Image: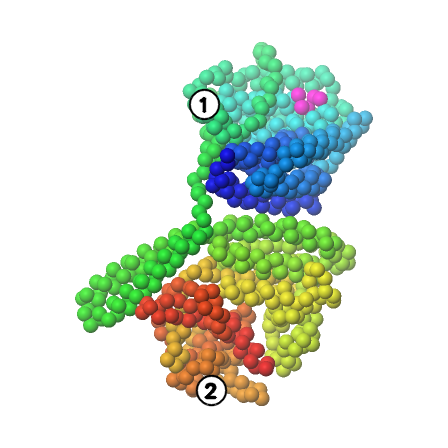
Amino acid sequence: MLDMEIVDFFMEEAEELFDGINSILLKNEEAGEISKEEIDSLFRYIHTIKGGAGSVGLTNVSNYTHHLETFLDSIREGDAEFTREIINFFIDSVSSMQDILDKEYEGSIDEDEVNSMIKTLKQQIKSFMQDKEKDSFTENNKEVSPASAAELLDLFEEIFTILNEVETSGNAKEVAIDELFRYVHTLKGSSQFLYLSYFPTYMHDIENILDDVREEKVPYTLELNTFLLNSLYIAQEMIDLELNGKLEKDKFEKELNSLRDEINEFEIKDENSPAFEIFDDELDINMSAFEIFDDEPEPKAPPIPKASSVQETPNQITPSPKEEEPKQTKAPAKKETSIKKVASSSSIRVNLDKIDNLMNRVGDLVITKSMLFQFADNLREHDEIYKKIIERLDALDRDIRELQESVMSVRMVPMESVYSRLPKMVRDLSRKLDKKVKFEHFGDNVEIDKMMVEGLMDPLTHIIRNSLDHGIETPKERQTRGKKDTGTLTITASQESGNIIISIKDDGAGINVDKVVNKALENGVLSKEELSKMSFDDKVMLVFAPGLSTADKVSDVSGRGVGMDVVMNNINSLGGKVEVKTEPNKGSEFKIILPLTLAILDGLNVMVGDRKFILPLSAIVESLQPKKHMIKKIGKNDREILMLRHEFIPIIKLYDFFGVETKYTEFEEGMLIIVKSSNTKVALFVDDFLNQEQIVVKSLEKNYKKIKGIGAATIRGDGSIGLILDVMNIVEESKSQERE
């Protein structure tokens, strides 16, 4: 009987792991190769799914995944290499894994079907291993594929980098021994597929001495490091000689005997040190409890006979007694830490509803704090009491802000949770459009409010579809324009000044601004008079106009003119804005700017007649009481504008917009607050502005209905409802009224 609560936790984790797997595979599908780090990540993801599924009783998916894991481990060890065909095989197999997992979770699994799938899987894996043996080497002339040669050179480079770092620092205790062992092991394994016989034998002995270091049988000293450097230089020459058929057996045996002589000098016959025993005990316990590592140990090479001489190497340093003590080697400590990290976790999963409830309680505290401050204002005439109360309220205010930030940090999730959904979409769409696209993303660890993630997906999807369809050209078009046939689509996330900034950039053709403007005129989105006053940036923003599309025909990708309208509406609803930059034949960049949170914001209270509204501080550019000469009238309707520092800014009278009685009608008597929406500046005319305060945002649309010009509401300190202005909506509504 499955413990469904534990299974549900595993299913949540599995969803994230599958996202990680698909992200790596899809990103590297076109290249047909995957980096070592990504292969290691794939292995961890698949290994975790296998182990997790087995531990919660989902045995079918665990059995299926075991074969994928074994094949992937062979690739890690150099027994096979990733190709485009193998990447596609993994994409399909991981899809099958997800299908098996879903069915087993629902209790609708057909075990005969799973066994058949496993049989097919094993046959496919076997064919890949056979293909590797056939294709990697032509035995008659020993031809090596460029990919294999590059792999060997890269491995040598990584090994020499580690060894040279130790030589330079003079500190042998900081050697990355596990990494060094892995590179040497992979180098040996890869060379075996080139039908070499001398080189793998030579490397096997080097691998053995490194394995002894990992197991604390031999200390890693500067002398050993120098020996390894010299030995691997010889190995590098040896592989070239053998590939060309120029390595004589006698010469090889001489080099091998010399290698073994020196290795014997480094060996210490003390395998029962306390540190070694303790580590083994802990490893046995962890393996039996969690079955984290199930690799079988490699058989050791036969004992090397003791020789009578030692080959001298340059710059030899006699090891100190401390260096010769196995206890001092750091490699086992790293292993132990790694095991503990896999076997246990310092994090817990919490239902989002609980976080929201906690955030609401913090919001109530903010409201109560406002009430207390308002109550304290009534005690101003009692100076001594008032000062003491304000001091304590200030302390309370600081504590509540810290609590609010702490709760907010729990709501935040890394951008990689957003990115993980995009690669497959880019892959499928670029194939449909016959385009080559390289998808890159940066800022994976930048955090965003979990509540924004779903609202952000639609805008990102539409912008990416737009970039792929209208922006990035076909390979033939790109070559004609002197570009690489593969386009690049890049998403970058960063945090600046209390905002999340997400940039979506492509290196395509750029936006055809003239075509956009003509469509806007044709559709009545703007008049020729309005067009004459528009800057280039204003014209670019017309891509967000409802119903406007520059596509020549409607397809299942685009053409109806609704996608970019959705982008603007969704970003507005998240309290953000969009900026666009474009350059012909260079590409376009869409920049989404969002507040860190929608839950609490700083606002400015403004008076319009006897009504009090709240204006978000993030929208305000500046405020002023204008002089008469600063107000100008233009156009047939005597449209009033503010002339400020050679800039003409449209004025919106809030008393007219909301239809309320006002105290002042002359601009010089009231105040103008300049706000910015996207790339548009407007001046809002109000009677006065009051105090600034922190407010808790409550959705008006969810609790009541959508109101023109109002974005949300809050509860004030006196218990009344405060309305929060929606600057973007006010600007758009004003433009619409003018056009009408």
Amino acid identity at mark 2: His
Question: What stretch of residues is rendered in magenta?
Answer: 197-201
Q: Position of residue 708 (x, y in %)?
A: 50, 74
Q: In this view, does 273 lie to the left or right of 117?
A: left
Which numbered disc, 2 or 1, marks the residue that appears first in the sequence? 1
- Element class at badge 1: helix
Figure quadrant of residue 246: top right
If the image is split into quadrants, where does the C terminus sit? bottom right
Residue 221 to residue 27: above or below: above
Q: Where is residue 40 in the image (x, y as percent from the top left)?
A: 58, 37
Residues 79 and 659: in front is 659
**Residue carrying label 1:** 281
**Residue carrying label 2:** 629
The answer to whether residue 200 is magenta is yes
Residue 28 visible somewhere in the drawing: yes
Amino acid identity at mark 1: Asp
- Element class at badge 2: helix
The answer to whether residue 213 is magenta is no
Q: Where is residue 89 in the image (x, y as percent from the top left)?
A: 69, 39
